[in-house]
Image (cartoon, rainbow, N blue to C red):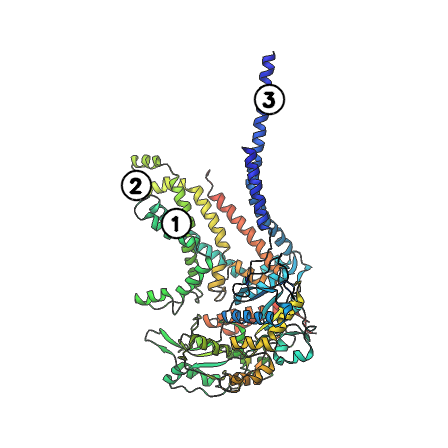
Amino acid sequence: MVKQSIAAITLAFALLLASCGGSSAPAPAPATGGEAPATGGEAPAAGGEAVTINFLTLQDDDLLIATNATIEAWKRSDPQYANVTVNIQAVPFAQIFPAIETAVASGADLDLFLADGPDMKHYAFNNAAIPLDKYFTAEEINGFLPINVQAGSYNGVFYSPGIMESCSLMFYNKDMTDEAGVQPPQGYQGWTMEEALPNWQKTVKSDAGGNVSQWGLRWGQGTYWGDYELGIVRRSAGPKGSPTYMGMAADGVTFKGYMDTPEALRAYEFQRSWYQGDIPISPQEPINQIFFNKQAAFYISPDNAIGTINRMFPDGDFNYGVTGIPYFADGAQICHTDSWHFGVSPASKNQDTAAALVKFMTGPEGAKIWYDLVRQLPARVELLNTLPEYSQPPQQYFAQAVQAIGEPRIQTPGYTEYQQVFAEFMQNVAQSDAPIDALVADAVTKIESAVAKYKGWNE
Amino acid sequence: MAQQLGTAQSATSFLGRMLNWRRQQLIVAFLFVLPAMINFATFRYIPIVQAFIASMYDYSLLGGFGDFVGGQNYMRMFTDPVFWRSMQATVLFVLYKVPLQIVLALGLAMLLARQSIGTAIVRSAILTPMVTSIIIVSIIWAMMYHSQQGLLQSLLVTLGFQKIAFLSDTGRALPAVAAMMIWKDIGFSFIIFVAGLKGIPEMYYEAGIVDGANRWQLFRHITLPLLRPIMMFVIVTQTIFSFQVFVPVYQMTQGGPLDSTKVIVYYIYQMGFRFQDMGYASAMSIVTLVLLLMVSWLQMRFLRMDD
């Protein structure tokens, strides 16, 4: 009886161990609907080797649809890729950076990842991505907008092409602005902040108890406190080329004298008034889809908002317009550029295949498929210049603005550290009454301490 | 003589069989424990040792091990104001959550320990949050707390009060997270207390009633002393769990505003994964572990049965 028990437990334990002995990576979803991932014993079909590419990307419906469509087109484009299976693992925005970092550090079976443009320098600095210059000719690299190449390069070496570009302008709900008697200017030049504030306030609707039913402004998409959106405000407080406008010293590790200038402090005070002023124009806590749900009159966003409006309101019952992004009168108008870039992992055993996929997705055919589904500024010059919608408003404004006022976010391997502290700082500006100068001094100290390890990265 | 020898041999054989049987029993027991031991070694003890080693280095996930810095990461905590704020937030969270949760769970357990009509439904209602995903619960509660559109705001306005900012107010954010976690975790304490109450023999209460004890005296002199081991288990486990709170902070407040909800595990995560400072994050993990061991030891010492 006892011997039988021992045998049974040993067998059960052996089975348990065997079941744990597979791949340590989480089971990813297949890239295309219904297609089974490649298995180890699968025989290669004619003309192509059975290869599996593990692709870590962003959990976003629009991007996933575009990713799958582009991958399918790539597999059809050349018989040698017909048997490639792309396993997609999608994670939310907040988790993509730690997910990439953990996967690369642990040597997980990761071939390809999608990363926010400014983070690419961090991955290049830490050898978490391979240079792609051997896969792209100089002519092919020149096919991308210069700001895109700048974001995807590290110390002059090309690491990562972007799938699209961005530049935020100000959308407005025309029904709401008409009702409030507000006439936003035409074109991408737009209002100054000083002009915009009373107009934002005019569109706010609230009852006697202060309960707001319609807000004036949602500044930025996605993360509520992020640098992509809110970093623009302080940079626009300084004239072009000034420390405030630059946002950071050229060494990529000095923020004192750039993030805490008198102009920047004025901008932060101005931002605080959005949430805590006599007439608050933005809620202190983010309201999801506030513009698309017709709860805010103005919305700062890249042009992918047009795609969202088209998807959510196919009958066209969302009356909107686009105007320029506001800036301070004695500063300069600016929009942050960059978007999602591809990185190939150094741990990948299929680097050539992964690079081929990147090249297709960011190439003429892939970029067009992507654009048709996502509707955001393309990173490719010829596509931007040939798409008819970018020759007429409102998308024309985006095409003009990205080249006229577009500036990459600060370029440093410490962007993630900066971004984390900056987001906390902005949250504190909006939600607390702590003195702004003390908050910014604390933030600058934290950032400089966190990025000190990158000193000399670009020398 | 031969009979005596036979008896002795028989006894020796019986003893041998008994020893053999005991050894086999031990092997069986060991095999039962082995998976748990492997699990603990792989996912607990080895990482603790590795974290301790990492804490002595300038270490980041992508950059790997840099210079050996000895105790520098530990010394850094003394001069890091955010570390102390995180510790303060963590201790406050534990103080908000654990006592209130235990009082509520014990009260509910006493009310619902005996089977009556509707008990099963109420018990299920109390236990359901416990088995619900913490990330889902955090998202839902963040929506309920929302300063403009939350369900709780609607209730307040309906009752004639002004809206209250829960998660964006430095004074209310941490208690709000603690309240949510009490709701989430109360089922665990409740079920343990119910089991403990069922283990108290009825005759003690009968004797107390015969002696003229009132309900409070029965609770004070019978229920509480006999629940002491259970109470110790609940307090120690809940303190440990509360010290490790992370997901609701990550999901609901991101540590803000003004670090008011930046509990230690969130700060460790931020340092390790956001600031690429895994060495310092490891040092803070080790200090947190030591603190938890000390707190648990103190709690066990004060609540020991033989006192």
Q: Earlier in the sequence, mark 2 or mark 1?
A: 1
Q: Which mark is residue A154?
A: none
Q: Which mark is residue B12?
A: 3
| Callout 1 amino acid | Ala
Task: Provide residue B198's location: percent of width, then percent of height.
Answer: 38, 40
Q: Which chain carries label 2?
A: B
| Callout 2 amino acid | Asn
Asked where in the image residue B203 lies, by quadrant, the reply is top left
| Rendered residue at 49%/52% (across/down) | B241
Labels 2, 3: one chain: yes
The residue labelled by disc 2 is: B214
Q: Residues within 10 Å of mark 1 (few under 14, many from 20)?
A: many
Q: Measured along the vertical axis of the image, is residue A381 above or below residue B73?
A: below
For marks 2 and 1, give the one nearer the viewer. Answer: 1
Task: Provide residue A287's location: percent of width, then percent of height.
Answer: 43, 71
Task: Provide residue A69's location: percent of width, then percent of height.
Answer: 54, 71
| Rendered residue at 46%/57% (across/down) | B134
Labels 1, 3: one chain: yes
Q: Is label 2 in contact with label 3 (beta carbons under 8 Å)?
A: no
All told, the count of numbered labels is 3
Is residue A412 visible in this depiction of the protein?
A: no
Query: Which of the image's four quarters has the N terminus of chain B?
Result: top right
Q: How crowded is mark 3: few (under 14 residues within 10 Å), some or many (20 or more)?
A: few
Asked where in the image residue A369 lies, by quadrant, the reply is bottom right
The residue labelled by disc 1 is: B105
Q: Which of marks 1 and 3 is nearer the N terminus?
A: 3
Asked where in the image residue A264 lies, by quadrant, the reply is bottom right
Q: What element carries label 3?
A: helix
